[in-house]
Image (tube, helix red, strand yellow):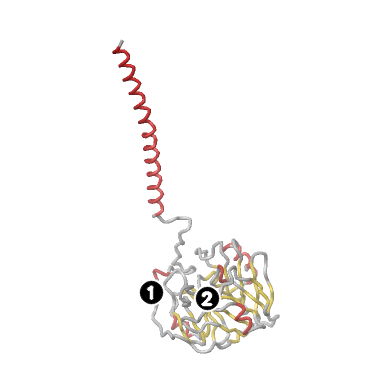
Amino acid sequence: MTNKKQYRRNNTSSKQTKQRKLPKLMILAVLIVIACIITFLFINAKKPNQSTKNPDKTTSSNGVVASKSVSIAPADVKEETGDSKWVQVKSKQKLDKFTDMSVPGVTIYRANNPKVLKTANAQIPGTFMMSDIVAKYPNSLILNTSGFDMATGQIVGFQVNNGKLFSNWSNTAYGSAAFVINKDGSANGYDLNTPADTILKKGAQQSYGFGSILIKDGTVLPNDGSVNWMIHSYIGNDANNNIYLIISDTSVGYDGTMAAVANLKLQNLVVLDGGGSSQMSLNGQTIFASQDGRPVADFIVLQ
């Protein structure tokens, strides 16, 4: 009898021990699973996110060459170029000075035979609110243009004012294209394959730029990914050398922008600084407001 009781006590004790061990094993198993999940996420976080990776830019003749493959030719760069001067753009036909050609989602203004002023004239030109520029040039069509480093204020990419180079091409993802207005009033689009000295010899007086070229010499170029869901600003000209200032709204993208300008017969179209920098005014009235009231380093002013 005593042995049976002892057996039952031992058996009960063994069951209780197993019952105590079971929750511990379950907790250990859960911890191991959690550790595995964390390790998996950490490893994958190190890998490039294919959905957000910048697309490789084509090296074909009708695309934009990746900046990492381009050797930037040296040029004589000035720290500053003197007070900004107007350049007369010569259109081939007489139209209204400014014409609203906007469509839903894309703000488009055409300027006919305008005088043009570039506000940035130095490597670090300072930043200004749209209201500052409007106060100085009230009867004008004004758009933000070139990109700049928001921390230092230094302007990005190929920059010319008064016929002098104050920033050479940037061998980066930005600063790889520019819209150039020449001394004779003509306009061209360039990318960083064309040396600065070559562009200056052709008469460049002002340049504006940030991203890629969407249309060059009348040819629509393939999407290289520089135009995404964000707000974007653009500058272009048509076969009659009218100047176009354009802002595409959020989520319009490359296809929506190209559809909006399809009937304008543009010869060149260059991507400018976008996002919160995008802003436009006409004769002192806001046409497109900056999302965050951002001061920027470069404006184009047309009268």
Q: Residue furthest front?
A: 2
Three-letter code for the amino acid on which mark 1 is drawn = Ser
33 vs 64: above or below: above
**Image side of residue 63 versus residue 261, left or right:** left
104 vs 9: above or below: below
Indicate the position of residue 133 as horizontal and vertical percent values: 60, 81
Check disc 1 and report the residue beneath it: 71
285 vs 205: above or below: above
Indicate the position of residue 168 as horizontal and vertical percent values: 44, 79
The answer to which of marks 2 and 1 sits earlier in the sequence is: 1
**Image side of residue 65 versus residue 88, left or right:** left
**Image side of residue 213 versus residue 89, left or right:** left
- Quarter location, residue 102: bottom right
The kind of secondary structure element at disc 1 is loop
Three-letter code for the amino acid on which mark 2 is drawn = Ser
Indicate the position of residue 156 as horizontal and vertical percent values: 47, 75
Q: Residue furthest top?
A: 1
Check disc 2 and report the residue beneath it: 146
Asked whether 214 or 77 is in front, the reply is 77
Which class describes the residues within 10 Å of circle 2: few (<14), some (14-19), or many (20+)? many
- Quarter location, residue 32: top left
